Image (tube, grey):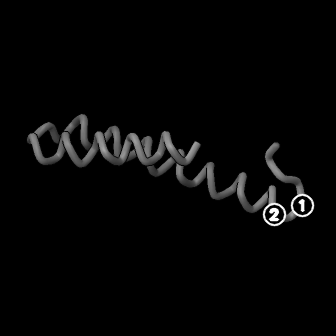
Amino acid sequence: MLSWAVLFLIIAIIAGVAGFSGIAGAATGFAQILFVIFLVLLVISLITGRRAP
């Protein structure tokens, strides 16, 4: 999940440099949403004490 957030962040940076503000904004939004979901899942995992296999 974190890799998806990083991927969309990289896409947003490249699109921003290239001047595609609409694509950059959308990719940044996806990256932020995925990062928040990742953090929530991390906290839940830490609270319950379960580990990924």
Q: Nearer the viewer, residue 14 or 27?
A: 14
- The residue singled out by tag 2 in the image is 46
Is label 1 in a helix, a strand or a loop?
loop
Position of the N terminus by quadrant: top right
Number of other residues with Cα within 10 Å of mark 1, as a class: few under 14, some 14 to 19, many 20 or more:
few
Coordinates of residue 10 in the picture (x, y in percent): 31, 45
The residue lying at 72 percent from left, 52 percent from top is 41
Give the Cα separation between the discs numbered 1 and 2. 5 Å
Coordinates of residue 19 in the picture (x, y in percent): 9, 41
| Residue 15 horizontal side relative to residue 37, left or right | left
Coordinates of residue 35 in the picture (x, y in percent): 53, 52
Position of the C terminus by quadrant: top right
Res 36 → quadrant = bottom right
Q: Residue 41 carries which label?
A: none
| Residue 42 horizontal side relative to residue 38, left or right | right
Going by the numbered disc 1, the residue's amino acid type is Gly
- The residue singled out by tag 1 in the image is 49
Going by the numbered disc 2, the residue's amino acid type is Leu
Query: Do labels 1 and 2 touch, CB within 8 Å?
Result: yes
